[in-house]
Amino acid sequence: MMIEINNVNKIYNEGTPQAFEALKSIDMQIDEGEAVVLSGVSGSGKSTLLSLIAGLDKPSSGKIIVDGELISKLPDLHASAYRAKTVGVIFQHFNLLESLSVEENVIATLIHSGFNMTTIQEMTRKSMALASISHKATTDVKSLSGGEKQRCAIARALVHEPKLILCDEPTANLDRANSLKFIEILQSLHNMGKTIIVATHDPLFEGLSFVSKVVHMRDGAIGNE
Amino acid sequence: MLDKRLMNSAFLHFLTLLLFKQKSKHIGAVLISVIIIFLLSAVLFISSSLQYSLLSTLKTQADFSVSRVQAGKSVNTPLEWVDKIMEINGVSRVAPRVYGRYFFTPRENDFLVVGIDFFDEQNSEELKKLVEQLDLKTFLSSESMLVGEGVKKFLSAHYFKDYFTFKTPQGSFKKVKISQTLPTEANLVANDMIIMPIDLSREIFGLEEDEVTDVTFNVPNDAEWDNIITKLHLMFYDVRVVEKREIKKAYENLYNYKGGLFLILYLVTITTFILILYQRYSMVYSTERKEIGILRAIGWSIKDILKLKFYENLTIVIVSFILGVILAYLYVFIWDAPLLSQIFLGSANLSNNVSFTPVVEFGLLGSIFLFYAVPFLAAVLIPAWKIAVTPPKEAML
């Protein structure tokens, strides 16, 4: 089992009148190499669940175990190491460092990896090739199109060769052609044996052959799988 | 010991990259910091240099000078005092002196006229060298004088190229040849000075042959100073004693960095500095918030973020400090501090062309560095830490 989620709850502003229950008693298991789609309307809790699996936030209660590691209780240093080694995240708004070039954004992930600069540059080159963005390596991110930014984000998410790839509304800011291209890249990553979780409400993800599971979410809870 | 990770070429590469790519973000703070460091260092260099020059000059002066006072008013001192003072045990190099301010009546300027015995051993090293170079026979036979650079320029501008005619108190005129100009290095104390034979100065100030303005002497044993003062008061009921250590205190206070003009300068720099700190603090919260969130999301720990921000801003601090200090050094010691030197030296009497002797007080420079570096780094690291400890998801919003 790659991911095990047991009775996870997430409450924002807990203990205040503005308390909001974003996730309610979530249970889920995902095997290694599986491609899973979390679907649901905006505010259904899929992005929150994804951020908990990515270690970007902590659940209010419950357990999340990834690759045998209880990530819901990790202290900062271990949580950072988990994000740096095991997970690659592709965000809806790309979240790139705008003042840096494509190559420099990708390199940023490996600064504390312990590899020397030659190895880092080699890994960066491979990752940019995989995401089809090598031709823009030295271009500053701020002058890229939406699709190119997306591919830069993919290259950054893949550079450290993570086992788990998480995509949060990856096609929300892309046109149809770029969205289809992104799905192609996802398929190739699936073929490489990566575990993939995509949170989306894009109909293009419906009925994809390589997707093993579609989890519908509504009001912070899982509907039918 | 240097941090192992700092030695990591990837970290250094990324640090350099961020500094160069985001230079527009730092340029304002660097410029203002350079100006602040430059101002503080320039003032420090000037005051240290002036104090050094004055105290060096003072070292060559006599330990005591005594003169006669009557009802609190200075009057001429009898020459016989020289012999009486010589009789006191522990006293050496007793010399009569005539000096006073001579007013150049067409303009409101004055010169300091000092009359000395050229055959005596001179107290001042500069004067000693100058006297050695002089052809004393010609100098003394032709009624000549040595003038400071400021006096020379001033007299030349008023068409007194080779001679100057003094008016004596008796209403007669005394024509004196301008023999030589005193060296530029002595400008701080000798710019407005005229040195001439003691007899000539007596004539100009209307003193009798058995009168001087004061008598100077040394007391090599410091422990005897107070005893000597007591003896002088017992010997002469109307004596005024000026000690070298009192003059030293006055010089030290004159260019003391802890008071007066410096306090105003500190207030201005502190106000400007607070503005920079506010700018850095706000910048981290606004523009760097997302950057920190992104780096955290891709696996950077809180420690990694703080390390990046620390070294990034330490580089800015060091670059600004070195630039500010180098500029101040060039400004003061190479270009002789135009504008700022006038604040220190004033230009009420004769305009002065002072060359500052390079004196660098590393202890004070270190204090300026700490005064600047610690709040600067804190203004960045505190907000950076606050952002880094929030969940990356929130910081990226």
Image: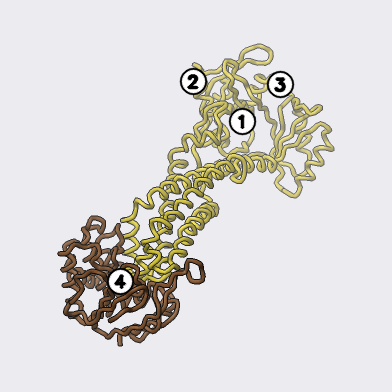
Chain colours: A brown, B yellow
- Considering only order in the chain, which callout, 1 or 2, is on the residue closer to the N terminus? 1
- Element type at mark 1: loop
Closer to the camera in the image, B394 or B186: B394
The tag on residue B156 is 2
What amino acid is labelled 1 in the image? Phe
The tag on residue B207 is 3
Q: Label 2 to label 4, Cα distance in Å?
A: 75 Å
- Element type at mark 3: loop
Measuring from the top left, give residue B180's x and y in whole percent: 51, 27
The chain identifier of the residue carrying mark 1 reads B
What amino acid is labelled 2 in the image? Ser
What amino acid is labelled 4 in the image? Leu
Closer to the camera in the image, A125 or B323: A125
What residue sits 58% from the left and 24% below the top?
Answer: B140
* Disc number lying in front (4 or 3): 4
Q: Label 3 to label 2, Cα distance in Å?
A: 28 Å
Q: Are marks 1 and 4 in contact (CB under 8 Å)?
A: no
Q: Label 2 to label 1, Cα distance in Å?
A: 26 Å
Residue A167 to residue B118: above or below: below
What amino acid is labelled 3 in the image? Leu
Q: Label 1 to label 4, Cα distance in Å?
A: 81 Å
The chain identifier of the residue carrying mark 3 reads B
What residue sits 44% from the left and 79% below the top?
Answer: A61
Q: Quadrant of residue A140?
A: bottom left
The tag on residue B118 is 1
